[in-house]
Amino acid sequence: MSEDSSENKTPPESSNVSKLSRGAIQALGGAIPFAGGVFAAISGAWSEKEQEGVNKFFEHWIQGIEDELKEKETTLIEIMARLDLHNEEISNRVESREYQSIVRKTFREWSAAESESKRTYIRNVLANAASSKLATDDVIRLFIDWIETYSEMHFQVIAEVYNSSGISRGQIWRGIGKEEAREDSADADVYKLLIRDLSTGGIIRQHREVDYYGNFIAKPKKKRSSGGGSSMKSAFDEEELYVLTELGQQFIHYAMTDLPIRIEFNEEGTSEVQP
């Protein structure tokens, strides 16, 4: 890398940052008419007396934007490295208006720096969306929304359910490495909310028997025991088993299945196609 390029990456001088700050505020004032007067007043105050703290804020803000763009660029490169663009069907899909719309939605709404695992899920969804027809484009958009909305713990639970033929809440809790918790604890409340999110979202469901036509068979009602009161179902219940829905299975295929790399780049900058 040349000295010029390295110098360009050093933070600007304080006076330059101050000009940058004022310029950004003035631009915002022009973009948001009703706020223009407020931004103009702030900009004028800074021009009289520089505020080092504000300058540092803008330095971090600009750096954050640069980092996010780099992550998105890396993600796109990794996607293209996994696609066989010599395959006419895949090539047409990548160039299609529908696929380009999905890519634009993804990078417009996705907070790139949130976590490396979410970046990987996004990469997998976009790569599989180009090479697989298992799910419709509307469903793929839903998967992208899930990645944006759900936490890392949600995805840990999904993985535990996927790796079993039926698993209880208690088994999931232990499987994701959590310690025993009281029923009236915040941990229990969060866990119940998480299970409810995934259940109402259509990703997991309680295991139910089905008939020949795929219809769910109603469970026989349990007789209530006479006598004293009964406690509510535990957040870490060991009886009811959970499985992935068909939609959840598709999500696993798209978000948690990594396509093999087809193109690798060596130190000389040339590419090598993998067999």
Image: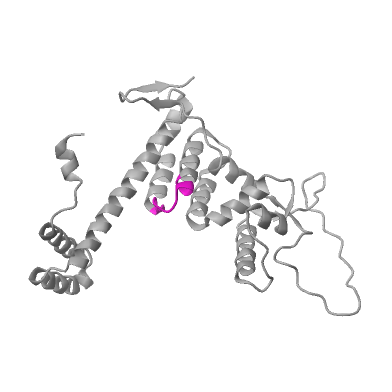
Residue placed at 46% from the left, 26% from the top? 262
- Colour convention of the picture: one colour
Q: Residue furthest bottom?
A: 228
The percent position of residue 171, horizontal first and vertical second, equals 71, 55
Q: Nearer the viewer, residue 38 or 154?
A: 154
Please state if 145 lies on the left or on the right of 46 as rendered.
right
In reply to whether residue 118 is colored magenta, the answer given is yes
Residue placed at 56% from the left, 56% from the top? 153
The percent position of residue 86, horizontal first and vertical second, equals 43, 22
Please state if 40 lies on the left or on the right of 248 as rendered.
left
Whether 65 is drawn above or below 221: the answer is: above
Whether 63 is drawn above or below 179: the answer is: above
Q: How many marks?
A: 0
Q: Quadrant of residue 91?
A: top left
Q: Nearer the viewer, residue 77 or 185?
A: 185
Residue placed at 36% from the left, 25% from the top? 266
Quarter of the picture containing the N terminus is top left
The percent position of residue 16, horizontal first and vertical second, equals 11, 57
The percent position of residue 47, horizontal first and vertical second, equals 9, 68
Q: Residue furthest right?
A: 226
Q: Residue furthest front?
A: 179
Please state if 190 lies on the left or on the right of 35 as rendered.
right
Please state if 183 lies on the left or on the right of 43 as rendered.
right
Q: Quadrant of residue 53?
A: bottom left
Magenta stretch: give its range. 109-119
Q: Residue furthest left?
A: 48
Q: Quadrant of residue 267?
A: top left
